[in-house]
Image (cartoon, helix red, strand yellow):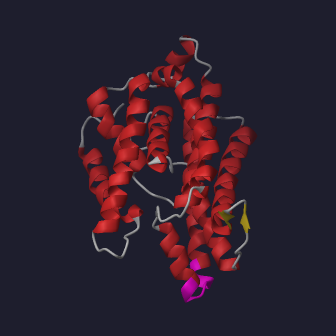
Amino acid sequence: MTTGGILAAAGVAFQALFRNPLATPYTLGVSSGAAFGAALTIKLGITMSLMGISGVSLGAFSGALLVVLIIYSFTQIRNDFSTSTMLLAGVAMSIFFSSLILLLQFLADFTQTVQIVRWLMGSLAVIGYQPLVSILPLGLIGLITLFWLRMDMNMMLMGEELAASRGVHVNRTKLLIFLSVSLMTSAVVSVCGPIGFIGLIIPHAVRRFVGIDHFILLPSSILVGAIFLALSDTLARMMIAPTEIPVGVITALVGGPFFLWILLRKDLEM
């Protein structure tokens, strides 16, 4: 449930930041970086753990952080923190790390390849509370920051120039949203893998009922996202029990048609 709430909140924030209804928590390539880190850890056979956190999770978190640092450094070098620059840099990072993942799969043996593919599907098959403890610090910091920025996100929906005229420090707001969403998404992906479409489905579904005001939209999306992922995980465990389907497969089966429905709508503007 924690994972679902965080991913839904991240989707709400990025859709406000980019003013794009198709933005997701993985828009800037965080999931690809995490997947590369996890795949590299599996390929190298690293089995160490730190404070109960597995080597694969540590590798995934490191890969995600690497993407965040690259994108942030790129914007600083260009002295341009515009949303278009971040978006293009994120797309480039996603393609680049996806290619590296394919290379690792080609070089890996059969067992390692299965482990990599299984991780890429996303799963909530964790034992104990240690994974939750590893997610909560960055998750809570990110959520608190987004709650603090709800008014600014409302202003950002009207455009950066208008938001600036209303007293919003646009670059600071964009930086805080970028860092908050990227870090809490990195924490989630490092533990559960890239569970897709929650950050896309939930904000749209909730927005149709509560509107675009982030004072209502953000907490509502967190609640609905948590419930949706819990129901998806329940379905994944029951469909072909006792075998458990990776929950990322279920969310993708729902999210794919929903994505096409969004593309077919005429009122894509936010």
- Point out the residue furthest to the bottom here: 110
Left or right: 228 in relation to 173? left
- Percent x, y of residue 180: 61, 38
Point 63% across, 32% down: residue: 176
**270 or 140, nearer to the observer:** 140
Q: Residue at x 57, y 55 (%)?
A: 129
**Residue 134 screen position, x and y as percent:** 63, 52
In reply to whether residue 180 is colored magenta, the answer given is no
The vertical placement of 171 against 127, above or below, is above
Above or below for 168 versus 104: above
Is the residue 71 above or below the residue 106 in the image? above
How many numbered marks, from 0 up?
0
Q: Main secondary structure of the magenta part?
A: helix
Tell me, yes or no, if residue 24 can be seen here: no
Looking at this rendering, what residue extends furthest in the top direction? 166
In the depicted view, which residue is nearer to us: 38 or 260? 38
Along the line of sight, the residue nearer the viewer: 152 or 138: 138
Residue 50 visible? The answer is yes
Decide if residue 202 is on the left or right side of residue 155: left
Q: In which quarter of the image is the C terminus?
A: top left
Q: Quadrant of residue 203?
A: top left
Residue visible at 36% across and 26% down in the picture? 212
Q: Write the residue at 67% across / 72% down.
A: 41
Residue 99 shown left or right of residue 200 in the figure: right
Q: Is residue 19 above or below residue 119?
A: above
Nearer to us in this view, 251 or 75: 251
Residues shaded magenta: 105-111
- Residue 174, percent from left and from top: 60, 31
Counting from the top left corner in percent of width and height, residue 61 is at 65, 57
The quarter of the picture where residue 136 lies is top right
* Quadrant hosting residue 111: bottom right
